[in-house]
Amino acid sequence: MTSLPPGLIMIITAALLPFVPHIWRQGLMLGAIALSAYGLMLGAGDHLVWQVLGYDLVLYRADALSFPFAIIFHIAAALNVIYSWHDRHWSQHCAALSYAGAAIAALHAGDLITLFVWWEATAVTSVFLILAAGTDSARRAAMRYLIFQVLSGVLLLAGAAVLAAKTGSIAFGAMTLGDSASWLIFLAFGIKAAFPLLNGWLQDAYPEATVTGTVALSAFTTKLAIYALARGFAGTEYLIWIGAAMTALPVFFAVIENDLRRVLAFSLNNQLGFMVVAVGIGSELALNGAVAHAFVHIIYKALLFMSMGAVLHQVGTIKASELGGLYKNMPFTMLCCVIGAMSISAFPLFSGFVAKSLTMTALGDTGIMWAYFVLLFASAGVLEHSGIKIPYFAFFAHDRGFKTGEAPLNMRVAMGIAAFLCVAIGVYPAPLYSILPFAVDYHPYDASHVTGQMQLLIFAMLAFVVLVRIRLYPPEIPSVVLNSDWFYRRLAPQIGRPVLRAVMLVWRAFLCQMRGFIDSFWFMLERLLRSPIAGPTIPGPAALVQLLLLMGVLVLGYVAAGA
Amino acid sequence: MTSKPSQKTLDMQKLGRHFTWFLIAIAVLLVGLELVVHRHGVAAIEDSFMFPALYGFLAFLFIVQVGKWLRLMIMRPEDYYEGGPSDD
């Protein structure tokens, strides 16, 4: 039983959920997650290998890199089950559990074909979390999301095929960027990791999902991509450039975005940048940083999405221009949101601090100072959009006169657990450090580091207070902010449609012309055949039949002579 | 005639004032600590007096200002994607 790939039991259970009454469903899901986690006890090694067509399909490989990701994916799946306990319909539970299961199974894929299967499975299962919102915009966003996710899978499969043709191996291990196979796979990972210009699907689709769906979405796909990059492309210098751009650029978009869940999606992109930079550095300390960051990020990002989900669930909107003053209505949610905000901002004693420090120190060790200062700048940006903007506009800012209370108990329990983990890991990081891929000899809490970080954060907050007091902080405006999805949602149709129309016009004219030629040809042939060939008594078709018969006789003659 | 602010608005204003003073108190404490803690950074410039504080303060102002400029370029009405050609 334990040699089954972790996650598979969750997918099997998900298939049974439509037939299970609500009262048992959540318990069954938690049981499946626990059983899947129990499978991790098998330890490192290749535990399930199938030989197919001469290739080794490694369905269950565990090692020091997959282990921390597997743990946090199980925790995230369990948190999501608790958070969505109130939802009595099976469809979203089914999608969320199979999505988490597919992501966990993907972590344990030891070859590119198995990875491809689970890679696509995460896409197909997760899209239902967006569709479940039931709105027209969600349906459209879901289709765009699916196109990008499937494209990523197709690129991965193409890369695997090229690799197999060249080397005869489909093993998923460290690669060097250079040949077409590695670039195809790199691009496939890059789409799911939301590289610059490939990130539109993330900010487009995640905020369109349901209250509970966004929480699940925030945990798995992108962190699976970080895991894949860490395994395949650790130490690839391009990733430092790409990651640095990812940390800095979304910050500016998040400042002016009105939808608070979309702000969090930009923030997610920014956080992925830190991890991508760490993978690009590739040292043991940096890879520990990437994994630790992914681990804590899943918790505090889920917490922030949960708190905004709770607000959306209670109030019916998540737009900054319509929110405010909820701190008295939803004090517990506000507290959890602030804990999530402080964690993502990397305040000392919160989880973000103990993880991000690893990456920053590793980056400092490389001597790539420009990237170091970009990430330091991005840290102030994180504080701006996730640390301040989210709690400020949702719970303070303006009194909108809402008459609502706290979210359902199960939502508060999930938020409470996540908030507890944020503080617990921040205060006592040793258990987290003990499961990182490499041995850790790092102490985040030295006076120099703590005071430096506090200076950065507190004075950035003072800048916010000054801007608000002198009324220079940008007000919330009902709007949409154009992102890279604009290229295919607006530019491509605007340019593409006239071009397509012109092409179709030429094509139709060509077809018309060709039809004319063909008609003329048949007409000529018909006339030729109908015209007498050998005098007035033998018409063309009769001559043709005779010709064919004679040819047949000739062929038969040759065959007979040959035999 | 301006409407009278609600009790909650007044409470939030009071909370804001307390929070501001709280931040100022921590900032003063950090300035004091800077004098006694030997803070060292990765780059030499980081060892300058209150460098992270200045960097954080200016970075925040820069982000907000660039955000305001960006609004002029990439902010659109809420129904921007709803009209026009279908994006399916």
Image: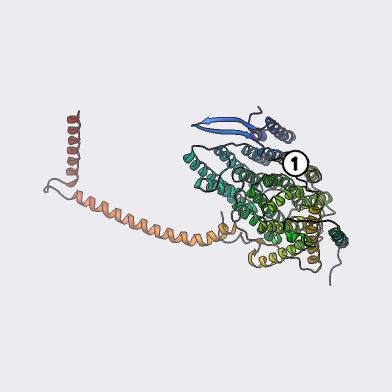
Q: Is residue A281 above or below residue A560?
A: below
Is residue A538 visible in the rendered image? The answer is yes
Q: Is residue A159 above or below residue A391?
A: above
Judged left or right of residue A28, residue A336 is: right
The percent position of residue B29, horizontal first and vertical second, equals 87, 59
Residue at (30% x, 55% y) in the render: A517
Judged left or right of residue A356, residue A561 is: left
Chain of the residue that carries numbered disc 1 in the rendered image? A
Per the image, the residue denoted by label 1 is A432
Judged left or right of residue A117, residue A426 is: right
A329 or A219: nearer the eye?
A: A219
Q: Is residue A536 above or below residue A558?
A: below
Q: Is residue A163 above or below residue A199?
A: above
The percent position of residue A250, horizontal first and vertical second, equals 67, 57
Quick one: label 1, few (<14), some, or many (20+) residues within 10 Å? Answer: some
A14 or A474: nearer the eye?
A: A474
Q: Quadrant of residue B50?
A: bottom right
Which quarter of the figure is the N terminus of chain A placed in? top right
Q: Residue furthest bottom?
A: B1
Dot 1: element? helix
The percent position of residue A361, horizontal first and vertical second, equals 72, 51
Amino acid type of the residue that numbered disc 1 sits on in the rendered structure: Leu
